[in-house]
C-alpha cells in the first residue's frame, strides 16, 4: 500500500526545489487550505496530512474545548499500517505533554524519548509539540512524531512546525470568532423576534380599540375626536412597520429571510403595486404608468415580498418627484431573467450618493427625518434572496431608475437586456459614471 507521503508528495512538491522553496510551498498550501472554510474539520485533517507528507510519520492536532480539555481534531499517518500505531502514539492517553506545551506557550522538541515513556508499544523516536496560539492564548497543540530512529527532528523542522502552528492557531481563532458572531446574530434575532411578538400583540390590541371607538362613538363625538384617533391609528401603523423592518433586517443578516416563490405574471404584480401605492401618489397627483411589451410573461418570485419592494421604491420616488410628475414601472424579458425597472421624473441622485443607497441606515441629508434608512437595504435583501440583482442609475435633473432582475418561469430567446437606454452592468462591474453624466451603481458592488 502506498503511503500518504508517496501519494501526496508528487502533487504538493512537484518539481523538487530547494528545502526553503519546499517549506514555503508547504506553508502557502497550508494557508490556502485553512482559508477555504470556517468549518475547520476537513481543513485540519488536510493540514495533518500535509505535515506527514513534509516531515513526520504521525501528526495530531488537538484543540482545547470550553472546559479546557483536549479534543482530537485531526490525525494523519504515513502508512495505513500505522493506524494501529497511532492508537498508542504520544498524546492519546493523558495529553500530559500537550498540557505542558499549552501552559508554557513554548514548543517542545524531544530528540530521543525514553523507550515506552508514553505508554506500552509507544513507537515515537522523536517528538515535536508546538502550541497553537491565538490572541487570547493557547487554543490547542500540534504534535508531530517520527517513528524511525534515523529520522530525528531538527531545529529547522521546529521552525517549520512553528510557522505551521501559527497558521493553524490563526485559523482556529478566526473560526471561533465567526462562530461567536453567528451566535450573537442568532441570539439578537431570537430576542428581537420575542420582543416584536409581544409588541405587535399590544399594538394590535390598541389598534382594535381605536377602530372600535371610531365606529361605535356617536357621530358628534366622532367628529370631535376623529383627528386624535386617526393620529393614534397612523402611529400604530408606523410602529408596526418599524417592527417588521427590524425583523426583516435581522432575517436578512442571518440568512433566514422567508421567501415563498411562485409564478406570477409581471403585469399583475405591477397592477397590485399601483393599487397599494395609490394613497401615496394621489395627494401629489403623481401619475404611475406601466410599460410591458407583449407577449405577457411570468416571473418566479414571492408576491408579498415584491409588493414590499415596489412599495419601498415607489415610496422613495414619491418623496422626490414634484407634484404632477410621473413614475413608470417597466419590464422586459430576455434569456432566463426579466429586467424590471422603476423610473421617476425626480431631481436625480448625485454620483457621490449612489454607492451608499443600499447601505443599512444610510439616508440623504434632506430625507434624514423621513424614514429609518432601512427600505433600500431590505429591498436589496429581498431581491437577492429570490436570486435577483438590484442596481440604480441616475442623472441629476433627469430622474432616477432602479433596476431589478427576476428569474423567468419560461426562459425565452436570449437578447441583450436594454431598457430606456440602460444596459445591465456586468456581474462584478464596479460603480461608475457613464456618458459623463449618467451614474450607475449596483447593489452588490
Image (spheres, helix red, strand yellow):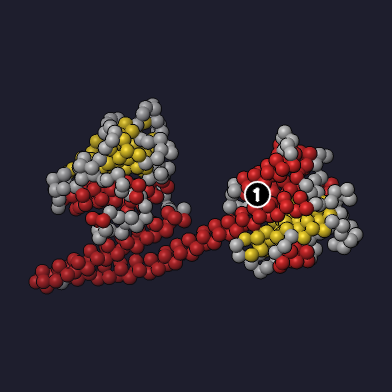
Foreground residue among 171 and 81: 171
| Occupied quadrant, residue 343 | top left
Mark 1 lies on residue:
43
Q: Give the residue drawn at x 35%, y 60%.
A: 244
* Residue 197 location (% of width, % of height): 39, 66
| Occupied quadrant, residue 15 | top right
Q: Is residue 298 visible?
A: no
Left or right: where 129 falls relative to 259: right
Quadrant that contains the C terminus: top left
Left or right: where 188 falls relative to 106: left
Q: Give the residue drawn at x 40%, y 68%.
A: 195
Q: Give the residue drawn at x 37%, y 36%.
A: 425
Quadrant that contains the N terminus: top right
Foreground residue among 225 and 3: 3
Q: Is residue 250 visible?
A: yes
* Residue 210 location (% of width, % of height): 22, 69
Q: How many marks?
A: 1
- In this rendering, is residue 118 above or below 33? below
* Residue 336 location (% of width, % of height): 41, 33
Foreground residue among 161 and 190: 161
Which residue ends up furthest to the left in the rendered image?
220
Foreground residue among 64 and 249: 64
Left or right: where 288 falls relative to 201: left
* Residue 236 location (% of width, % of height): 27, 66
Q: Secondary structure at mark 1?
A: helix
Which residue ends up furthest to the right in the rendered image?
115
Left or right: where 445 falls relative to 236: right
- In this rendering, is residue 16 above or below 236? above
Amino acid at each position: 500500500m502506498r503511503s500518504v507521503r508517496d501519494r501526496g508528495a508528487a502533487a504538493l512538491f512537484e518539481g523538487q526545489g530547494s528545502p526553503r522553496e519546499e517549506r514555503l510551498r508547504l506553508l502557502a498550501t497550508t494557508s490556502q487550505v485553512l482559508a477555504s472554510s470556517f468549518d475547520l474539520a476537513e481543513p485540519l485533517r488536510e493540514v495533518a496530512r500535509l505535515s506527514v507528507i513534509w516531515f513526520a510519520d504521525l501528526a495530531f492536532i488537538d484543540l482545547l474545548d470550553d472546559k479546557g480539555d483536549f479534543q482530537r481534531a485531526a490525525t494523519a499517518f504515513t502508512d495505513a499500517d500505522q493506524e494501529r500505531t497511532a492508537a498508542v502514539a504520544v498524546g492519546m492517553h493523558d495529553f500530559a505533554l500537550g498540557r505542558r506545551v499549552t501552559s508554557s506557550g513554548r514548543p517542545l522538541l524531544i530528540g530521543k524519548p525514553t523507550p515506552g515513556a508514553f505508554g506500552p508499544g509507544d513507537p515515537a523516536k522523536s517528538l515535536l509539540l508546538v502550541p497553537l496560539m491565538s490572541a487570547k492564548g493557547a487554543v490547542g497543540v500540534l504534535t508531530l512524531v517520527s517513528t524511525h530512529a534515523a529520522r530525528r527532528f531538527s531545529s529547522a523542522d521546529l521552525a517549520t512546525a512553528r510557522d505551521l502552528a501559527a497558521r493553524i492557531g490563526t485559523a482556529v481563532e478566526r473560526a471561533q470568532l465567526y462562530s461567536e458572531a453567528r451566535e450573537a446574530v442568532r441570539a439578537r434575532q431570537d430576542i428581537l423576534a420575542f420582543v416584536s411578538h409581544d409588541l405587535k400583540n399590544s399594538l394590535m390590541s390598541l389598534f382594535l380599540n381605536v377602530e372600535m371607538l371610531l365606529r361605535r362613538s356617536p357621530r358628534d363625538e366622532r367628529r370631535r375626536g376623529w383627528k386624535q384617533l386617526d393620529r393614534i391609528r397612523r402611529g400604530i401603523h408606523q410602529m408596526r412597520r418599524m417592527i417588521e423592518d427590524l425583523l426583516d433586517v435581522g432575517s436578512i443578516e442571518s440568512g433566514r429571510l422567508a421567501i415563498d416563490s411562485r409564478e406570477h405574471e409581471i403585469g399583475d404584480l405591477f397592477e397590485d403595486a399601483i393599487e397599494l401605492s395609490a394613497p401615496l401618489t394621489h395627494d401629489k397627483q403623481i401619475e404611475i404608468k406601466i410599460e410591458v411589451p407583449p407577449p405577457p410573461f411570468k416571473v418566479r418570485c414571492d408576491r408579498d415580498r415584491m409588493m414590499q419592494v415596489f412599495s419601498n421604491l415607489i415610496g422613495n420616488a414619491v418623496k422626490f418627484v414634484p407634484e404632477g410628475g410621473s413614475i413608470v414601472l417597466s419590464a422586459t424579458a430576455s434569456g432566463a431573467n426579466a429586467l424590471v425597472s422603476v423610473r421617476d421624473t425626480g431631481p436625480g441622485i448625485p454620483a457621490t450618493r449612489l454607492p451608499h443607497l443600499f447601505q443599512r441606515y444610510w439616508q440623504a441629508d434632506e430625507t434624514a427625518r423621513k424614514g429609518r434608512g432601512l427600505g433600500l437595504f431590505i429591498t436589496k435583501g429581498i431581491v437577492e434572496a429570490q436570486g435577483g440583482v438590484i442596481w440604480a442609475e441616475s442623472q441629476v435633473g433627469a430622474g432616477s431608475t432602479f433596476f431589478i432582475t427576476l428569474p423567468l418561469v419560461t426562459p425565452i430567446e436570449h437578447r441583450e437586456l436594454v431598457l430606456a437606454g440602460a444596459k445591465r452592468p456586468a456581474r462584478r462591474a464596479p460603480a461608475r459614471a457613464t456618458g459623463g453624466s449618467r451614474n450607475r451603481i449596483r447593489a452588490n458592488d
